[in-house]
Image (tube, rainbow, N blue to C red):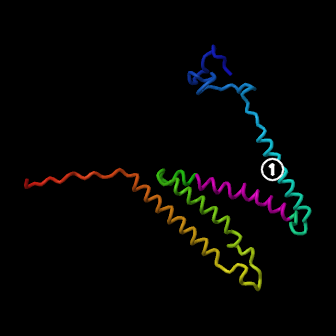
């Protein structure tokens, strides 16, 4: 860091190298570092206890839970999330930020969040994971068509709310009073 009496570095802004806005800031003093309180540590302890209880149950009931498959499921979910889902969400978010006008952006974001949540929730039914052979009542509906119908209702609602808000936010047009040419 440049000492304050030496002045700014060559070609830099006048406050470069100095603590404060625009300059290099010094590390906060040790007394200013945030310390975690008892609530944090108690909730962390409770969380780890619940995780331990769940793992114990998964291993204790290994015939039903199949720990190796459970491990592959969680590991695969993390990899798919990190390599596919998160980048896709980022790309869509950047596209929305660049392509959608600011007045409609919040509505489009809300519609995308609801659509994504619905798709995640309905995925097992859409994929027929619970269908049992020779039992037509296990999954008796067309869940793909139902998902598309609900998503259509979501987007019709998003468009309707956006249009109503846009009309309400426009300033009222003033009309000129009529003048009677014969008066």
Kindly identify the residue that appears in the image at 67 percent across and 64 percent down.
Answer: 120
Report the residue that reaches farthest toward the bottom: 134
Residue 98, given in percent of the width and then of the height, sits at 52, 51
- Magenta span: helix, strand or loop, mainly? helix
Kindly identify the residue that appears in the image at 40 percent across and 54 percent down.
Answer: 168
Placement of 45 over or under 79, stated as above or below: above
Report the residue that reaches farthest toward the right: 60
For the N terminus, the quadrant is: top right
Q: Is residue 88 magenta?
A: yes
- Tell me the SS state at disc 1: helix
Kindly identify the residue that appears in the image at 88 percent across and 63 percent down.
Answer: 67
Q: Give the range drawn in magenta.
A: 69-93
Residue 142, given in percent of the width and then of the height, sits at 64, 78
Q: Mark 1 points at which residue?
A: 47
Left or right of 123 in this view: 65: right
Residue 83 versus residue 63: which sits nearer the camera? Answer: 63
Q: Does the magenta stretch include residue 6?
A: no
Report the residue that reaches farthest toward the left: 182
Residue 145, given in percent of the width and then of the height, sits at 60, 75
Left or right of 14 in this view: 64: right
Residue 110 versus residue 1: which sits nearer the camera? Answer: 110
Kindly identify the residue that appears in the image at 66 percent across and 54 percent down.
Answer: 87
Residue 46, given in percent of the width and then of the height, sits at 81, 48
């Amino acid at each position: 860091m440049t000492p304050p009496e030496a002045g700014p570095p060559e070609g830099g802004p006048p406050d470069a190298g100095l603590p404060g806005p625009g300059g290099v800031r010094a590390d906060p003093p040790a007394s200013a570092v945030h310390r975690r309180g008892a609530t944090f540590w108690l909730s962390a302890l409770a969380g780890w206890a619940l995780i331990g209880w769940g793992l114990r149950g998964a291993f204790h009931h290994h015939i039903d839970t199949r720990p190796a498959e459970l491990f592959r499921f969680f590991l695969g979910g993390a990899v798919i999330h990190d390599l596919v889902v998160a980048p896709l969400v980022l790309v869509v978010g950047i596209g929305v930020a660049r392509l959608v006008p600011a007045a409609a952006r919040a509505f489009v974001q809300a519609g995308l969040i609801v659509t994504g949540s619905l798709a995640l929730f309905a995925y097992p039914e859409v994929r027929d994971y619970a269908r049992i052979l020779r039992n037509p009542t296990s999954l008796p509906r067309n869940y793909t068509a139902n998902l598309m119908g609900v998503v259509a209702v979501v987007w019709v609602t998003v468009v309707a709310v956006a249009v109503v808000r846009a009309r309400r936010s426009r300033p009222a047009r003033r009309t000129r009073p009529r003048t009677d040419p014969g008066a």
